[in-house]
Image (cartoon, helix red, strand yellow):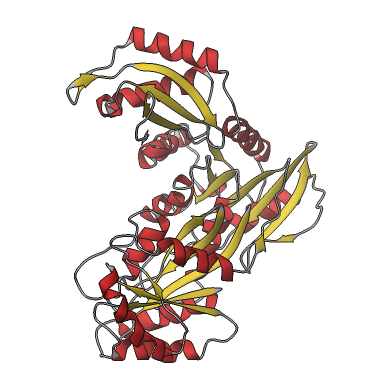
Amino acid sequence: MKILGKVAIVGAPSSGKSTIFNRLIKERKSIVSEEHGITRDRIYANCEWLGKQFILIDTGGIEIQNVPFQQEIKAQVELAIDEADVIVFLVDGKTGLTNDDQSVARMLYRVKDKKIILACNKIDNVEMKDRSYDFYSLGFGEPIIVSGLHGIGIGDLLDAIVKELPHKDIPEETGKITFTLIGRPNVGKSSLTNAILGEERVIVSPIAGTTRDSIDTPFQRNDKSYVIVDTAGLKKRGKIYESIDKYAALRAMDAVSRSDIVLLVLDASEGLLEQDRHIVQIATENNKPVIIVVNKWDLHSHSADDQKKFTELLKSFFVFLEYAPIVYLSALYKPNLEVLFKAIDSCYEDFNKRVQTSILNSVVLDAQMMNEAPNFNGGRVRISYVTQVKTCPPTFVLFVNSPKYMHFSYLRYIENTIRTTFKLDNTPLQILCRRKGQGKDKII
């Protein structure tokens, strides 16, 4: 796998940065509105073009006028420029060259050794192309003509981005189980890392990861090869004006994307916080198996049913992680490390499991006969054929008469049948519905 680098989109307010950002990542992640200056904080997402991946950063708009949060927004843009390998300077072709564009340009004139790509947005037809000529005066060469609304020129922009990005190789640890620790600050991730590496370890070598502070450490345990990745504590989003803490989320995202398993580390003495839900979304959005690690259990009270009650609390709090094993331990005293590694091994096995097609079809056919699908959207779904198309996570395609007839509850029933029958207990699954011959996928 290769992450080619990072790309920041900068420009004046309402130049269409968030629209272009959403168009490039093929997902509505940044808020798009007619209201002036919606984006204030930096937003990160993975982007792929022709099999090549990079990280895209959306930023707030820079303007001369003294408006609320402008100082904080400018600081965020400067941080994005600092960490990016390539900068896309987006201008509004419909409005034309403005003083705000020139203010952004003066900021970019100070940038050294980084490619700046000028893109002229909102050129929605051929007749408007002449409006891009004014922007030659900014000194960044010929602008690439794009329309975030209609998708015009997006391929040309992506070609230019990929061409200028440095190739940052991420070493593939073939045959090794890679797991990443994520969590709030001071929950004991580093202590757990030290406890894991300090027992029966043979460290091969430290390998620098894709981000400046991410370190991968390969090691051996019980004749198996692993790679552990520790990440910085993820603080609660709040103040916009921050420095090094803002890199923590990016480091965690990089680490999670190349891991097989994610360990969400919690502090038993502090209980559960809403921030824990936000942190684990980094793993669920990447479809990675999650192990909930309750650290510092030695500091928790130890009444007869305490662990049972805490488990029930975890399951209700993380209702979307029904497949996640829960491990109680103390990094300080190192009990239950063996239980943790059994959970890691089980997650890895399920994450990579492949099911025989003939048996899979037999199981799903029996499930339909035992529980007929309900009428939904004017029809009743019929599953003709099932196949597993990939692993990591296990992904199954149901070929049906019409995906619109598939009710969510019945799709969940099929998923639970597959999960239970083939013992896929410790991994997320993807179930897609496709019309026989042709149709749009519906993913659970």
Residue ranking furthest to the left? 378
Pinpoint residue 78: horizontal percent, then vertical percent: 45, 82
Q: Looking at the image, is 78 positioned above or below residue 383?
A: below
Q: Nearer the viewer, residue 122 or 301?
A: 122
Pinpoint residue 76: horizontal percent, then vertical percent: 41, 78
> Tag count in the figure?
0
Q: Is residue 121 left or right of residue 206?
A: left
Residue ranking furthest to the front? 127
Q: Nearer the viewer, residue 177 or 59?
A: 59
* Residue 233 visible, this angle: no
Q: Is residue 66 left or right of residue 158?
A: left
Could you tell me which residue is drawn at 32 percent across and 11 percent down?
371
Q: Quadrant of the C terminus?
A: top left
* Residue 87 visible, this angle: yes
In terms of image quadrants, where is residue 100?
Answer: bottom left
Pinpoint residue 220: horizontal percent, then vertical percent: 78, 44
Q: Nearer the viewer, residue 430 or 99?
A: 99
Q: Is residue 230 left or right of residue 396?
A: right
Q: Looking at the image, is 39 positioned above or below residue 72?
A: above
Q: Nearer the viewer, residue 273 or 278?
A: 278
Could you tell me which residue is drawn at 58 percent across and 59 percent down?
231
Pinpoint residue 72: horizontal percent, then vertical percent: 36, 81
Q: Looking at the image, is 330 positioned above or below residue 426?
A: below
In terms of image quadrants, where is residue 39?
Answer: bottom left
Could you tell me which residue is drawn at 34 percent across and 83 percent down?
62
